[in-house]
Image (cartoon, rainbow, N blue to C red):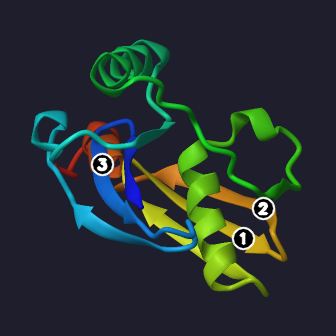
Amino acid sequence: MGTCLTVDQGNSTVGLVLWDLAEDGDEAHVAARPSSLDEVPGSPDRVLLSSVADPARRAALVAELEARWGAAPVPDHGLVLAIRHPETCGLDRLFAARAAAVLRPDGAVVVDCGTALTVDLVRDGTFEGGAIAPGPALLVRALAEGGAQLHA
């Protein structure tokens, strides 16, 4: 049994979850949801990172994680990618699709709304791709800037 800190660095926020891991490794339970690295209780046995931030912000976070707890690898998403340019797909989308694939192996549509709004299809362990559009804050700014009578 141990703990694992998952770090999800998006374009506008960083999400942290500390997990208690079962002995067999098949189950995990949320132990804490710290709002900053300084609030992480104890020293996690493992740190996993997912980042879609720009390279400088990602590098700064990796350096901070490594200074505190050692390596912070990016885990394998475990999906077959049926998309033309897999290198352009954000890890946030792939990890959300992986969670959906575990919960619904026969298929699921995954909708996520943050900086961007994404809608993706995962079926039989295969990420089929989807669409990406501006999230609410970006959409409000774009409409306010582009519409004469539309205000933020």
Q: In front: 74, or 4?
A: 4
Question: How far across and how far down the image is residue 41, in percent?
Answer: 15, 47
How crowded is the residue under tag 3: few (<14 C-alpha within 10 Å), some, or many (20+)?
Answer: some
Q: In which quarter of the image is the N terminus?
A: bottom left
Q: Is residue 70 above or below residue 80?
A: above
Per the image, label 3 sits on a secondary structure element best described as: strand
Q: Which residue is drawn at 15% across and 39% down?
A: 36
How crowded is the residue under tag 1: few (<14 C-alpha within 10 Å), some, or many (20+)?
Answer: some
Q: Name the residue under label 1.
A: 121
| Amino acid bearing label 1 | Leu
Q: Can residue 147 be seen in this view?
A: no
Residue 50 vs residue 74: left or right? left
Q: Quadrant of residue 82?
A: bottom right
Question: How far across and how far down the image is residue 28, in percent?
Answer: 43, 70
Q: Residue at x 20, y 50 (%)?
A: 149
Residue that protrudes farthest toward the left in the picture? 39
| Amino acid bearing label 3 | Gly
Q: In front: 81, or 71?
A: 71
Q: Which residue is drawn at 30% across and 55% down?
A: 17
Q: Mark 3 points at which residue?
A: 15
- Of tags 3 and 2, the one toward the viewer is 3
Question: How far across and how far down the image is residue 120, in percent?
Answer: 66, 65
Q: Is residue 38 above or below residue 89?
A: above
Q: Mark 2 points at which residue?
A: 127
